[in-house]
Amino acid sequence: MSQFIYQQKQAWFSLKQKPSFVASVLITMGTTLGALLCILTLAYILIFKPLPYPEQSKLYTIEHNLIDAESRIDGRAFTYPNLMHLYQNQTVFSDAALLYYDARVLTSKNNQPTLSTTFVTPKWFELLNAKMVIGRSFEVTELMNTFNPVAVLSYDTWQKEFNLDPNILNKKVEFIGISYRIVGVIEKSFIEPQLLAKGLKTQVYLPWDYNSISEQNRKEWGNDDGNLTFIGKLGVNKTVKQINQSLTSLINDNWQKQVSGRKFFKDWSIGIKVHDFKSVILGDSENTIYLLLAGVIGLVLIACSNIANLFISRTAEQQRELAIHASVGATQKKLFYTILSQTGLLMLLSVICALVLANLGFYILQNFLSEQLPRVDELAINVFTLCSAIGCVVLFALFFAYLSSKMINYHALNLALQSSGKGTGIQVSKQTRKTLVITQVAIVTALVFVNIILFKDSIKTINQPSGFNIENMSHLVLGVSPAKKGEQDSRAAALLELRKLLLSQPEIEAVSQSTSPLMRFGTWALMQNVTDKRYTPGGKYIDHEYFKMIEQPLIEGDFFNQGDVQNNNPVMIVNDIFAKQLAPNGSALGMMFNGDMQVIGVVKGVQLPGQSNIRARAYYVTSYAKNMMMLKFKPGQDLSRTQVVALIKEASSQLTLFGYSSLNKSKEKMLFTEYTTAITSASLAILTIFLAAIGLYGILSYSTQMRQFEIGTRLAIGAQRNDLIKMIIKDNAPAILWGFITSFIILLFIFVGLSDVLITYINAQLLSILAITLFLIGFISLFACYWPLRTIINRPAIYALKGSD
């Protein structure tokens, strides 16, 4: 132990003499290892770590497929009556719960925040072991059809909205006229499974009875709703295939009876698929993780190559010190341990820096990528992270020590001690230098090529024309209670009054009582009167101002007029994609659907942000009772949320502000993944090129310095500068070429192994991207060949022959 401590002290004393060397190693390895530990921890949590729920392997959710007559899946969400039939009659799951994801305006608070709400049956808390920090969860008094208005808060909501009020159980929350008594708060450590969408966090849990499904839709067997969710714990010993068959039979047989009189659903069916929790939560993120791992491992390899150059130079500098050790009896093994004590200390310090940077990475992922990657809330330095860190210390310390020790010719050390050190010191073999060059070029070429592809594809998606204009526009969503019979007229009157008040504001240019063009289209069932052919385009409710406001072009026919909206006329407008499906060789104008619904216009199709193609759409006349509006402001003008709330209160007490957002900001949010990919890929490409430039310069500079006497001799006998430049380039060209060839092999394996993911990227443009990549790496390589040589050939030959600076 005393010998070990002595070696560490000596290593520390030696390293203190070279602060620039230490700083270079710590910055390079600390940064790259920090990224590696961050991504490794993320990969461990997503792929290997069990979910934080009891008997998580038995927890399943169900996919409900509505299959049309051509055996195509028309929708993947439950209809309300099918979900209820499943819940009440299934025997596959020992315990089950229903969920409906929604959002509500908290009218009992002065600022009326919009909170994400989930309506659940009591078993939900038990299945996920959702413990309370205070109070209780739902119980038998909150079972289905009990209509007991109680609420459970998330810890975050208790903290942000109620300042951790210890008397919270004596409080109530009010949503759209219903007051719910708070009975519990979920503990802070609970992690909600992200079943509907990544990053979704419920703020308030309410009993299932109060979900916002209308009475009409509770009886509608054909209208699906993506917010309806079923979860259950498997209670039978059956295969997934057997379970799918059993549940499909249960649901489909009953559904066929219920829709037997409806022509639209002739030859349609229901298919059920069960999915374990982990696959649902992970989704398609696994491929993203593998790509991130590949990128960060590539950076680590480049960093290792650069650090190897530093250690090679460091070992060369230490030749006299090592020679003294050898002269007093140090064996080759002891010399290895001497070097290992230095590499180990540096790697330990690097990993400490890496852990700090990894923790920063966790924060960035949790705050900026929670909607793109699942389970990021679980990211923290854990046993796996620490074990990985220790593994990195051991692996890289041994690697750099081995590499440095391989340079040592033990029997030549005494000669080095006796000489002046010129020309007889430690040298790196030509094969080692060639291997380092090949490694650098291969890794950097592959990484830069892939990152340029990702960057170019992201920029293309961000800049693709949408076909509509949303400049100076905002979308307004109003909170309203479900309209009962006879209340539609009063709500319509309140909304018309609000519309009038908004138009009277000097900042506003136009108002459209329509759904935002950025919001998803609902699925509508249409049957053509003449042919009985069935269609399910995306549908949206709009008024007569919508197309003019967003400048969506009319191809033929007419837009809606004010009379269509006032009289709720059965007319619709289709986009050119849907019109082509309806009438491939003619016009869709005048076609009739569902009895009395007539096509009166065709508009140019629009492409929503982040979508790769334009889909079939249909637009229907809105009702004045619809609770969504678009506001177009005059250039440079706007209304604050406070101003909008004041106008809503002035218009009617039955309206509240549910949501108010700029359409441009909404578009940016929809393109967040593309922006993130573009920034990340560009940053990685730049960092990769920077590290490669440093690495290649270090290797080729060392090679040139080793040939300094030879170059000086050539200069002395009359060699021209250009000839010497060509000689150095020619000598290094094979290694660079082999690096390119190796990178092609790496890329080939990547594209073959991930062909299903990367197929969209394979096109003729890859050749231009490849050319750009080869040019960049070739330029860096040529620069690394020329610049170290420049200092030798631009001075008299005598300096090179003397080995003088």
Image (cartoon, grey):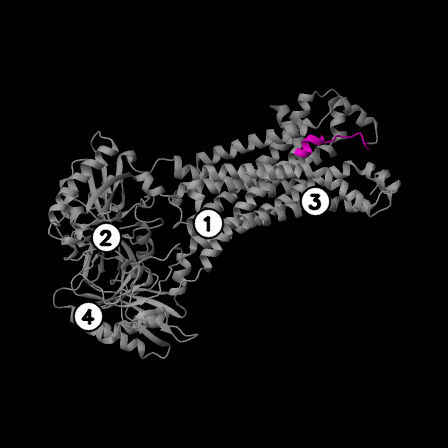
Q: How crowded is mark 4: few (under 14 residues within 10 Å), some or many (20 or more)?
A: some
Mark number displayed over residue 225: 2
Q: Is mark 2 on a helix, strand or loop?
A: strand
Alpha-carbon span between mark 1 and mark 4: 51 Å
* Neighbour tally class for label 3: few under 14, some 14-19, many 20 plus, Cα within 10 Å: many
Q: Name the residue under label 1.
A: 364
Residue under pointer 4 = 569
Viewer-nearest of labels 1 and 4? 4
Q: For residue 492, which quarter of the picture?
A: bottom left
Q: Position of residue 67 (x, y in %)?
A: 23, 46
Q: Magenta span: helix, strand or loop, mainly?
A: loop
Work out whether mark 4 precedes mark 3 in sequence or the reverse, and give the earlier one: 4
Closest to the camera, between mark 4 and mark 3, is 4
Residue 379, x across and y down, in percent:
42, 42
Q: For the residue labelled by badge 4, is the local secondary structure a helix, a strand or a loop?
A: loop
The front one of 454 and 45 is 454
Q: Which numbered tag is attached to residue 558?
A: none
- The mark that comes first in sequence, 2 or 3, is 2
Disc 2 packing (10 Å; few <14; some 14–19; many ≥20): some
Residue 99 placement, left or right of 794:
left
- Which numbered disc flags the more N-terminal residue, 2 or 1? 2
Look at the picture and state if 346 lies above or below 573: above
In the image, residue 316 sits, relative to residue 686, either above or below, namely: above
Q: Name which residue lies at 23% across and 72% down.
A: 495
Check contact, mark 2 vs mark 4: CB within 8 A: no
- Give the residue type at disc 1: Ile
User: What residue is at 78 percent from the left and 47 percent from the top?
Assistant: 790
Q: What stretch is highlighted in magenta?
A: 421-434
**Tag 3 residue:** 784
